[in-house]
Image: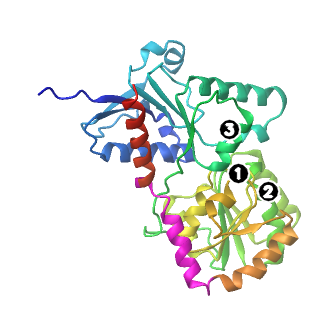
Amino acid sequence: MRKTERKKVLIDLSYLKHPNCGFGQIAINYSKLFAALSVEDLHFIYLLPKGYQDFYGNNVTCVPIKHRRINRWLPFTLPKVDLWHSVNQFNKLYRKSPQFILTIHDLNFLFEHQGRKKQIFLKKIQQKIDKATIITTISHYVADEIKKYTNLNGKEIRVIYNGVERIDQQEGKQPTFATGRPFFFTIGEMRAKKNFHLLVDVMKSFPEYDLYICGEDRFHYADEIRTQIKEKAVNNVFVTGMIEQTEKIWLYRNCKAFLFPSRGEGFGLPVIEAMQFGKAVFISNYTCLPEISNGFAFIWEKLKPEAMAESIRKNLPLFYEQKERIAQMKEHAYSFSYEKHIKAYIDLYHELLSSE
């Protein structure tokens, strides 16, 4: 009996060269997890940045992006496949395929830009949606935003929550900047949408604690926060810049609370990571954060430093006495497994390919 030919599924991992951003972490995890699967009827093709080829096993073919501009303007130079999966909205390469999955993580540009630049971004997203067979996204909040601001033309949009790596059992390492005092923690790219500047004033109410604000700090917003700290003479807030994974784990494990006032999230990965460690989590009432926290975080209804500080002062002392609630919170955090996430995509691949 003739063996059925495997369907070719291309997964665009071009963000593999950006390991310090969320899309880069997704690409790294995808490269490992899809390769580890034993799927008899699918063969995976990884579209990778030049120089990032590796051996991922017999069921993966690596295709380097040698000439991005040529590949973009002459798509026939890209692999011919049965299904193309663009794993985030910023991937630029595509060759027309029978099935095309477009994953959109957020529409934050709608609130970060104005005028012509905003319209250009929206037009680019719409062009990709027009090509897609189906759109997937990472929260119901983002799904609603896509329905509101784009034209799906009757196409299905499906929510597949992000997978979150279990890091609560991994080894941590104390950062050199740790003072030895009790501390609060937050992490993320230092962009204005994160609202980290509010925490400087919040910390005036907590002289007994330090706050470590960690993450990529090459943006002008980081300088604004450092200036704010200096001008207001707040000596218990530290902008650390990038940290190692082991340092992040130590900070989650040892912080008294995780503070996340962001107003621009598609999923909010750090919130789930903090919950894995059973920590008190304080979040804004914006975007997807109430959805993914599922009632286990303390929500700042008003992003005013005085009200935020009052919420921490009121809720933090009692939180760690609620053992059952903490156990339930951890189980909620563990439910965002990469196994569940990858299985959802494998099922979707099969669903689309069987409909041809």
Q: Which residue is found at the position 43% from the left and 54% from the top?
A: 340
Q: Which mark is residue 146?
A: 3
Work out which quarter of the rendered image holds the N terminus and state it: top left
Identify the amino acid type marked 1.
Answer: Met
- Magenta segment range? 320-339
CA gap between label 3 and label 1 equals 25 Å
Q: Position of residue 229 (x, y in %)?
A: 82, 63
Identify the amino acid type marked 3.
Answer: Ile
Q: Position of residue 260 (x, y in %)?
A: 70, 62
> Height in image: 316 above or below 125?
below
> Height in image: 297 above or below 267?
below
Q: Which mark is residue 190?
A: 1
**In the drawing, does residue 237 fall left or right of residue 257?**
right
Q: Say which element carries label 3.
A: helix
Magenta-drawn stretch, dominant element (helix, strand or loop): helix
Q: Is 220 within the magenta?
A: no
Q: Residues within 10 Å of mark 2 (few under 14, many from 20)?
A: many
What is the quadrant of residue 184 in the picture? bottom right
Q: Say which element carries label 2.
A: helix
